[in-house]
Structures are given as structure tokens and as C-alpha cells.
Image (tube, grey):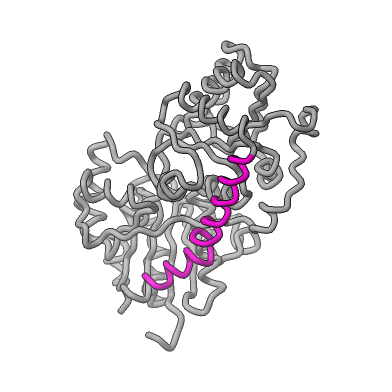
Amino acid sequence: MSGRPLKVVMLIESVRGGGAERFTVGLARALDDGPDCDVVVCASRDAGRNREPIAHETGVRVLMLGRRRTLSPLAWLPLIRHLRRERVDVLHSHMFGSNVWAVLIGRLARVPVVIATEHSWTYEGQRVRKLLDGYWIGRLATAFVAVSPEDARRMVEIEHVPARRVRTIGTGLLRDPAELQSAPGGLREELGLPPGTPLVGAIAMLRPMKAVDVLVAAFARLRERVPGAHLAIAGDGPLRPEVEAQIAELGVGDAVHLLGVREDVADILRSLDVVVLPSDSEGSPIALIEAMVAGRAIVASRVGGMPWILGEGDCGVLVPPRTPDVLAGAIADLLEDPARREELGARARERALADFTLESVAGQWAALYRELRG
């Protein structure tokens, strides 16, 4: 095996979407660019007939199945044929739906190594999902990979995944570090705010787990202590009407800016005095790693993998989830202490560039593939 690259297929429902999808494509591209792996991504639900090939969009070869229903066995035949024809060494799936199918398809196609990856969920409720994780995926996969030590612990203790099958590999930075460190930071000018205006913000989808409502509630309290502060939120989602209603009810519409989906994330991050991640649950969020590389002071909920990424508070401030008063106080403390913001930002950048670059993470995945392939 040492004489040729390993043939790898990464399975995910779509190559378009949120952090997990972005990371899967980025990881595939990084591995495929190296000497150890020959990678194809299989997007099971993306429609393929009028869209192939899309390598110019993703930077990696994509097999698109166009699966329309959850139970559609025939839709998997092109993947099974590819796995057998190419004698694929590793089938690496991402997220619950793909993990469920991968352990079956991998065995049918006689793939030597099948790896499942869970990017994040609460590991609470959803009894059927916990059973499938613990007694289907966790026992049929060669390895079940968590994106943080906390997720790995929950896999074993809550879902009863065999500990010997659980590994931990975090996500990695997808953007160019130089871009995140050198962007001009022109958001104040865009919003018509005077230079030096205290500016707090988040990069977050407007959906329940991101807890943007907690951030808005905290910001209303923050304004009592820092009256001139403004809040900017980049992202969109199904909860936008509720967030807009909350902003109006709290009377902070003059100081809260819902920016929608933005491509200039580096510029937004460099504009912010404090970056906030108020989530109810997280795995290993890319937005956090980007904020760290940008050298920002960070306040985050003590959930999921965020304490691990932030060095248990050495590189940012951790607060209990769903505590607007505590969150407001932590943000205000940083706004009033520029030296502390600078110190935390420098530590965060150093840690992220040491441990969470895409090259570092891709190296861990390549080593795991080789180990499991034997």
C-alpha cells in the first residue's frame, strides 16, 4: 500500500450548504492535492444531470447521485459501482444521514475502511438517532470520528458507541490566514458609524442552535453599560422574522445590523471589537477558528468543542449557554479593556495557526486512513 495513493470517496448529501459541507469539500481538496490520497466526493442529494462536472466550483471531482427520497436504494448504484470498479480503499462519510448509508454501502461494495464523521449535534433526544449512532454506525464503521473531545465523550457515554472505535479530529481553517489577518475592516464606514464605535458581532446562521436570540437579548442589556455599542450579525436563516421582531420589541433597532449572507467575512471579522458565539450546541465551528486567526477577542458559550478550541478560556472568554446577563457582562468587560482584547486575540491567533490549519487537520486524516488501511 505504501507505493500508491489511497483511493478515498467522501460521502455527503450536498457540496453546498453550511460549515460541514464547506469543510468536507475543503478537506477533500487538501487531501487530493497531497501525495497520499486520490479523493472523489460523492454528493448523494445534489442533482447531477445538468450540473456535472462541477470540479471548477469545488476544486475536487464530484460524483452526483441526485437522490430524491430517504429510501431510494437504486439511487446508490452509481456509487456502489464506482467503489467496486476503482477498488476504493476508504469510504469516509460526513453527517448522520450519510453515515447511516455508508456503513451498509461500504460493506456491500467491499470497501476495506469505512469511516463515519459526526460534525455536531446535541446527543440528546431523538432516541432512534442515538440508537443508530450507537448500535449501527458505531459498530459497523471501522472508526467513528468526533470533531471535539466533548463530542467523543458523548458518543461513548450517551450513545454507547464502542470507545475503541471513537477518534477525535477537529475541523480546520478554510480561508487564507493572510486574508483574515490583513483585511481592512471597513464595516463601520459601510454602516455609517464613526471610527472607534464599539462594535460587537457574530457570523451565524439564523437558526435555533446558533442562539442569536440570546445575543440580541444580551446586547439590549449591554447598551445599558456601553450606550454607544452596535451589533452586527452576518448570516441568514429561517429565524430572521423572529429575530427582527425581537429587535423591535427590545427597542435596539437603531444599533443592530442584520447583514444577511456575506462573502467578505474576513473584513467583517477584522471590523469587530468582540466576536460572539452564543450557540446552544457546537462541534468544532469554522467561524470560531476564523475569528481566532483574525486575532479577535472572543466570547463563546461553554458548549461542545468551543472550550477545547479556546484552550479552556486561555484564548477567549467562556460563558454558560442561555445566560444573557452573563454574556452581556463578558462583552462589556472586553469593550472596556482594549489591552485584554489584544492579549486574547494574540493568543487565539497563535493557537489556531498551530493546531487548526487545514493542512494540519488534513495530515491527521491522511494518517488515520493509512493506519486503518494497514
Lateral position of residue 312 relative to residue 188, left or right: left
Residue 150 to residue 33: above or below:
above
- The answer to which of 95 and 248 lies nearer the viewer is 248
Q: Which residues are magenta?
A: 339-368
Which residue lies at the image location 22% right of the left edge and 43% below the top edge? 158
Q: Is residue 244 magenta?
A: no
Q: Position of residue 216 (x, y in %)?
A: 55, 23
Lateral position of residue 172 relative to residue 280, left or right: right
Lateral position of residue 358 relative to residue 262, left or right: left
Residue 368 to residue 357: above or below:
below
Which residue lies at the image location 19% right of the left edge and 49% below the top edge? 160
Residue 188 to residue 251: above or below:
below
Q: Is residue 348 magenta?
A: yes
Quadrant placement of the C terminus: bottom left
- The answer to which of 82 and 220 lies nearer the viewer is 220
Which residue lies at the image location 52% right of the left edge and 62% below the top edge? 354
